[in-house]
């Protein structure tokens, strides 16, 4: 598993326990709702990805990849510029 996911869940559980001050029932209800919501949206993402897969085939897929790469370069450059300019 990805380390960031593990840290996310450790942080979520820790903060929830601290927020509900050890009240087991409220903690379990809250964490169950979080996990079910997370699972629901994962299923929705899988469904939408399977539908979009047919739409983004061939040339469209290449166009989307290039656009996403360009957007990452532009926004990454802006972040670097802002960090350097802030000094």
Image (cartoon, rainbow, N blue to C red):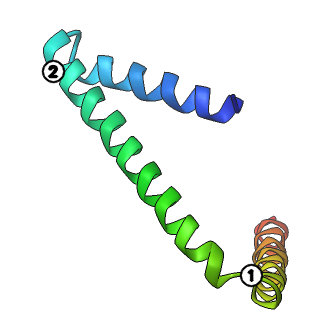
Mark 1 touching mark 2, by CB under 8 A? no
Q: Residue 83: x and y, percent? A: 79, 65
Q: Is residue 15 left or right of residue 74?
A: left
Q: Secondary structure at mark 2?
A: helix
Residue 7: which disc?
Answer: none
At x 35% / y 48%, what residue is drawn? 40
Figure quadrant of residue 20: top left
Placement of 86 over or under 68, stated as above or below: above
Q: Which residue is mark 1?
A: 57
Is 54 or 2 nearer to us in this picture?
A: 54
Q: Is residue 28 left or right of residue 70?
A: left
Figure quadrant of residue 31: top left
- Whether residue 45 is visible: yes
Q: Residue 8: x and y, percent? A: 54, 32
Residue 26: which disc?
Answer: 2
The quarter of the image holding the C terminus is: bottom right
Q: Residue 37: x and y, percent? A: 32, 44
Mark 1 or 2: the one toward you: 1
Q: Secondary structure at mark 1?
A: loop
Placement of 12 over or under 52, stated as above or below: above
Is 81 or 29 nearer to us in this picture?
A: 29
At x 19% / y 10%, what residue is drawn? 24
Placement of 47 over or under 41, stated as above or below: below
At x 76% / y 78%, what residue is drawn? 68
At x 23% / y 20%, what residue is drawn? 27
């Amino acid at each position: 598993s990805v380390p960031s996911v593990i840290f996310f869940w450790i942080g979520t559980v820790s903060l929830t326990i601290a927020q509900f001050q050890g009240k087991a029932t409220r903690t379990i209800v809250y964490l169950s709702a979080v996990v079910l919501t997370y699972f629901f949206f994962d299923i929705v993402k899988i469904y939408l990805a399977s539908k979009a897969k047919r739409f983004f085939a061939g040339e469209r897929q290449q166009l989307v990849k290039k656009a996403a790469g360009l957007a990452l370069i532009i926004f990454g450059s802006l972040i670097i510029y802002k960090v350097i300019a802030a000094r």
